[in-house]
Image (cartoon, helix red, strand yellow):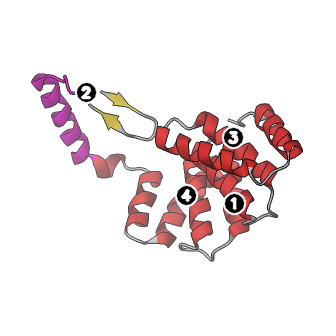
Amino acid sequence: MAVYSRGVVVVGEAMTHRANFFLVRSVLALAMFRPAIAGPLEDGYAAYRNSDYAAAMNYWRPLAEQNNAVAQVNLGLMYRKGLGVPQDNMQALVWYRKAADQGNDIAQLRLSLMYEGGLGAPQDYVQARMWANIAASLVPDAKYRATAVLFRDFLVTKMTPAQIAEAQRLATEWKPTK
């Protein structure tokens, strides 16, 4: 069994019945205590799933202000889509940037899309390619990595050789803040 950073659990086919029994028992035990161990991030997800965006924002904002990159990405999405707050691309860009600076690959790809579209900031292909390049190199999930690579390569069609070189230089020099 492998547990990945996104909370995905993969169980091998060769797992024995005894191991399977213990896994099921452990999952059921955790499920019984779920309300007691849920934190603000999970509570925010529950509120979001129930379309209670104001409550989700109330759970996530304090975490985001404490530099929780996942909460920052979530706030970026809420501002981008106008969920529980007025739609505001500049605020979305701010929150995505904070998470991207910490190395969050989802924020990096979303930030790239924002710069490419001129959403929340002037259109900037160099910044868009830089963030797409960083995301493509860091994304652990193959599907998202392929998306980042496709978008990174698409940006080349809109850029001069000098812009491509500058984006590559910036991506190479970038270091996460966390």
Q: Is residue 50 above or below residue 1?
A: below
- Toward the front, the furthest residue is 157
Question: Residue 70 magenta-drawn?
Answer: no
Residue depicted at x 63% and y 77%: 86
Up-down: is 131 above or below 86?
above
110 to 88, vertically: above or below:
above
Q: Secondary structure at mark 2?
A: loop
| Mark 3: few/some/many CA within 10 Å (<14, 14-19, 20+) | many
| Residue 21 belongs to the span the image colors magenta | yes
Label 4 amino acid? Asn
Residue at mark 3: 133
- Give the quadrant of the N terminus: top left
Question: Relative to residue 22, is residue 171 drawn left or right?
Answer: right
Residue 102 visible from this viewpoint: no
The amino acid type of the residue labelled 3 equals Asn
Q: CA distance from mark 2 to mark 1?
A: 39 Å
Q: CA distance from mark 2 to mark 4?
A: 32 Å
Residue that mark 2 sits on: 12
What are the residue bounds of the magenta stretch? 13-33
Q: Which residue is mark 4?
A: 74
Labels 1 and 3: the sequence-earlier one: 1
Residue ID for mark 1: 114
Disc 1 packing (10 Å; few <14; some 14–19; many ≥20): many
